[in-house]
Image (tube, rainbow, N blue to C red):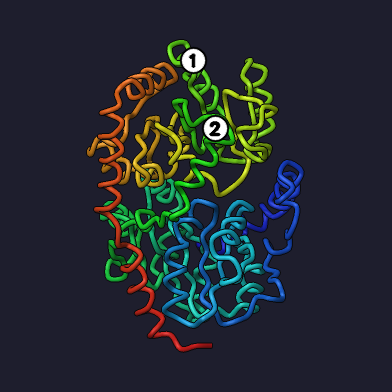
């Protein structure tokens, strides 16, 4: 009855899903292409019998890449990596290129899932973090395909939401072959919701296994030269959301009263909002440039100087974090749940965030305990905290070093997840 009710709700929602996909395509052109993949169509070049890894969006794909890399080296089975967002798709191509197969994952409509599984016939299904899709999980298990949830996380807020549909969740969670959790707290929440304790383990967070390219310093210096910022104090505001940029801008404006040379790099979470933010900033009187438009060397006298650089391309956050003296990690001054603070921590950049960090609660707690993060509640506190850190070079070094230490102490999860996956695959015959 639980699945019948779920499927009925999905069918009722189908017209709205189609309309929303069409509307999203008008706002973000990348959503207008490959629409049929959302309903189970698989590109002809995707072969059957591989390992299917689903990583949703850009952040999850970046985090999953080391695991996929290790899997490619250890197993000769083809790997299919799916996402749900165009930015996630971009990261698959950027990080994994032609070494993996790629398409969008189907929405969780029964017909779409069955069509996708008929075509791909995966040897195993690996879902990342919180991707609990009832039709997909149960359809795979009916076909005797192992389904694993890796790097699993379940915040208290998410757990409360799942408890409201416990009639459905308790039907689905026991169908997972294995669940590997980021922390013991996440593990316990899954068990409380109905997961089999014998199939769920705590293996750590693979985001700590971030691989830093040797070229990152060169890329950061080149970016600094192009935007005339190498001799300026630099604030990085990353993964910001609507309602949050205004607070960041207010803090930046307040800081420039005592730090007129302060430079800000602003990277909105969703690149399609760049035009909106450019209009907002220029109307406030700031000189703005876009990353994609900075093409001439900084020595060229025709290159205009700006107060703020807006990042309008994927794949440049790490050099920005390296270049910056302080990083504000967004999604935290608004109740979104925060974004990944491990990246700036790994690069030794002091971090400031808002109070809403439930998506990374354990990571955030570890960094805050070590003194790598400062938490603020509003624009005024943000300006005060940034000013204090900018004025204290010793504190900057101590915060940066503390972040690096936390990251180093928590590395190694990729190998543990790979061991779990290899064990499951050894028990599964090739198709």
**In the foreground, 157 or 163:** 157
Disc 1 element: loop
* Quadrant of the rendered image containing residue 169: bottom left
* Total numbered badges shown on the rendered structure: 2
Identify the residue at image location x=31%, y=31%.
396
Q: Position of residue 347 (x, y in %)?
A: 37, 44
On the question of residue 175 being in view, the answer is no
Up-down relation of residue 271 to residue 150 (above or below)? above
* Quadrant of the rendered image containing residue 376: top left
Q: Position of residue 264 (x, y in %)?
A: 51, 27
Residue hosting label 2:
266
* Quadrant of the rendered image containing residue 288: top right
The mark nearer the N terminus, 2 or 1, is: 1
Q: Which residue is most to the top?
A: 257
Q: Residues within 10 Å of mark 1 (few under 14, many from 20)?
A: few
Identify the residue at image location x=48%, y=58%.
131
Q: Nearer the viewer, mark 2 or mark 1?
A: 1
Residue 260, label in figure: 1
In the rendered structure, the answer to whether residue 144 lies left or right of residue 355 reads: right
Up-down relation of residue 72 to residue 272 (above or below)? below
Q: Position of residue 110 (x, y in %)?
A: 62, 67
Up-down relation of residue 398 to residue 404 (above or below)? above
């Amino acid at each position: 009855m639980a699945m019948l009710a779920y499927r009925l709700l999905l069918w009722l929602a189908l017209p709205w899903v189609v309309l929303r996909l069409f509307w999203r395509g008008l706002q973000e052109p990348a959503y207008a292409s490959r629409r049929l993949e959302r309903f189970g169509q698989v590109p002809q070049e995707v072969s059957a019998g591989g390992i299917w890894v689903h990583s949703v969006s850009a952040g999850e794909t970046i985090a999953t890449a080391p695991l996929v890399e290790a899997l490619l080296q250890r197993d000769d089975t083809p790997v299919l990596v799916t996402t749900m967002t165009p930015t996630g798709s971009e990261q698959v191509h950027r990080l994994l290129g032609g070494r993996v197969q790629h398409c969008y994952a189907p929405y969780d409509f029964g017909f779409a899932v069955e069509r996708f599984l008929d075509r791909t016939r995966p040897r195993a299904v690996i879902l990342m973090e919180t991707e609990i899709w009832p039709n997909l999980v149960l359809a795979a298990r009916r076909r005797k395909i192992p389904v694993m949830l890796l790097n699993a996380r379940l915040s208290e807020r998410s757990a409360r939401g799942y408890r409201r549909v416990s009639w459905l969740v308790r039907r689905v969670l026991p169908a997972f072959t294995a669940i590997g959790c980021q922390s013991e707290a996440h593990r316990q929440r899954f068990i409380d919701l109905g997961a089999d304790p014998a199939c769920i383990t705590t293996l750590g967070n693979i985001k700590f296994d971030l691989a830093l390219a040797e070229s990152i310093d060169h890329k950061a210096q080149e970016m600094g030269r192009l935007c005339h910022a190498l001799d300026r104090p630099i604030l990085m505001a990353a993964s910001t959301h609507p309602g949050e940029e205004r607070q960041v801008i207010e803090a930046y404006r307040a800081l420039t009263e005592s730090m007129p040379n302060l430079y800000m790099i602003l990277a909105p979470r969703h690149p399609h909002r760049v035009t909106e933010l450019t209009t907002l900033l220029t109307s406030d009187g700031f000189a703005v440039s876009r990353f994609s438009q900075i093409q001439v060397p900084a020595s060229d006298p025709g290159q205009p100087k700006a107060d703020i650089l807006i990042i309008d391309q994927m794949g440049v956050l790490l050099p920005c974090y390296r270049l910056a003296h302080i990083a504000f990690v967004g999604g935290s001054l608004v109740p979104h749940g925060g974004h990944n603070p491990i990246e700036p921590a790994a690069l030794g950049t002091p971090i400031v965030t808002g109070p809403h960090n439930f998506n990374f609660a354990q990571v955030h707690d570890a960094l805050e305990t070590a003194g790598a993060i400062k938490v603020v509640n509003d624009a005024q506190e943000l300006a005060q905290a940034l000013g204090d850190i900018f004025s204290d070079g010793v504190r900057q070094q101590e915060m940066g070093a503390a972040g690096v230490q936390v990251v180093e102490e928590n590395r190694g999860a990729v190998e543990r997840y790979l061991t779990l996956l290899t064990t499951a695959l050894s028990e599964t015959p090739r198709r």
